Amino acid sequence: MRRLSAISFIAAIVIAALPARAEEVVVFAAASLKNAMDAAVTAWEEQGGEATISYAGSSALARQVEQGAPADIFISANVGWMDYLQERGLVDPATRSDLLGNRLVLIAPSPSDVTLEIAPGFDLAGALNGGYLAMANTEAVPAGIYGRTALTSLGVWGAVQGRIAQARDVRAALTLVSRGEAPLGVVYRTDAAADPNIWIVDTFPEDTHEPIIYPIALTKSAEGEAAHLLDFLTSEDAAPFFEAEGFDVLDTDR
């Protein structure tokens, strides 16, 4: 018994001498942020932090937060879903800011001979040639909502709404086109730039939809190192990671 007690005592000393494990920060981020966020958070972790990122459509993530999911930071692909959580007292408005901007593009599999200029009344239905237009869910996911709004503004939604391949999020819509399962798709510029199998046919005029803005905020349940990660993501140190993926950085301390 004395030998066992001595071993236990020594083990306790060794464990106490080990550096404390960093408290893990849980981030809920819009699917379109994956490449940039992976790079930015990796850089933050190299400074001693630890984080886990869950990517999905902003609507799905916001509803998970509403249902009590343990998220510390929420980054939405539109202001609507951030407003949704703020109205329910689930994010800290004092920590909220507009972090990034993006653009909406029409894409095709690469290489492509599609030549189509986005303009009022353009023949999008004809360009599909019997195929489907890949889009994120047009009722709930920001990329899909922006896309539907743009196509409606241009007067072509009615001609294509029966030919929409609805995807769970914008990255899933991108994959449908990248694999050649859909001849055309509507995604963010940053998603298109991240996939070598994608060709950007044209960019939607900014006046055809609401500005594409990614707000960021701490949730009401945020703890530990979450505030430090938020500070990093909104700093000039993180900006290059977002700019490298084609985002417009809107709010840093530069």
Image (cartoon, rainbow, N blue to C red):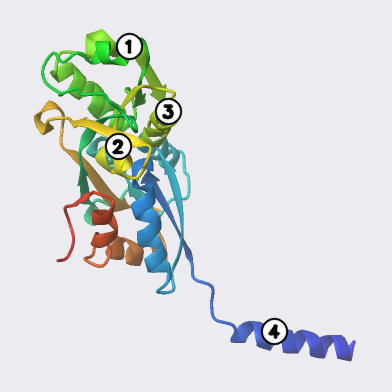
Number of residues whose C-alpha sits closer than 10 Å to that of mark 1, classed few (under 14), some (14–19) or many (20 or more): few
In the rendered image, is residue 219 in sight?
no
Picture residue at 34% right of the left edge, 9% below the top: 162
Q: Which mark is residue 233?
A: none
Q: Is residue 15 above or below residue 46?
A: below
User: What residue is rendered at 15% in x and 37% in y?
Assistant: 211
Q: Nearer the viewer, residue 159 or 227?
A: 159
Eye-nearest disc, 3 or 4:
3
Q: Which mark is residue 81?
A: 2
Amino acid tagged 2: Trp
Query: Residues under labels 4 and 1: Cα distance?
Result: 70 Å
* Residue assigned mark 1: 129
| Between discs 2 and 3, the one toward the N terminus | 2
Asked which quadrant contains residue 55, the reply is top left
Of the residues under marks 4 and 1, which one precedes in the sequence? 4
Q: Residue at x 30, y 37 (%)?
A: 81
Q: In the rendered structure, are the residues bearing label 1 and label 2 in contact, judged by CB atoms less than 8 Å apart?
A: no
Measured along the vertical axis of the image, is residue 171 above or below residue 140? below
User: Where does label 4 land, which residue?
Assistant: 12
The residue under label 3 is: 176
- Mark nearest the camera among 2 and 3 is 3
Q: Do labels 1 and 3 touch, CB within 8 Å? A: no
Which is more N-terminal, label 4 or label 3? Answer: 4
Residue 60 pos. (x, y %): 41, 35
Tell me whether the residue at label 2 lies in contact with that at label 3, contact meaning CB atoms closer than 8 angstroms: no
Q: Nearer the viewer, mark 1 or mark 3?
A: 1
Q: Amino acid at mark 4?
A: Ala
Label 3 element class: helix
Figure quadrant of the C terminus: bottom left
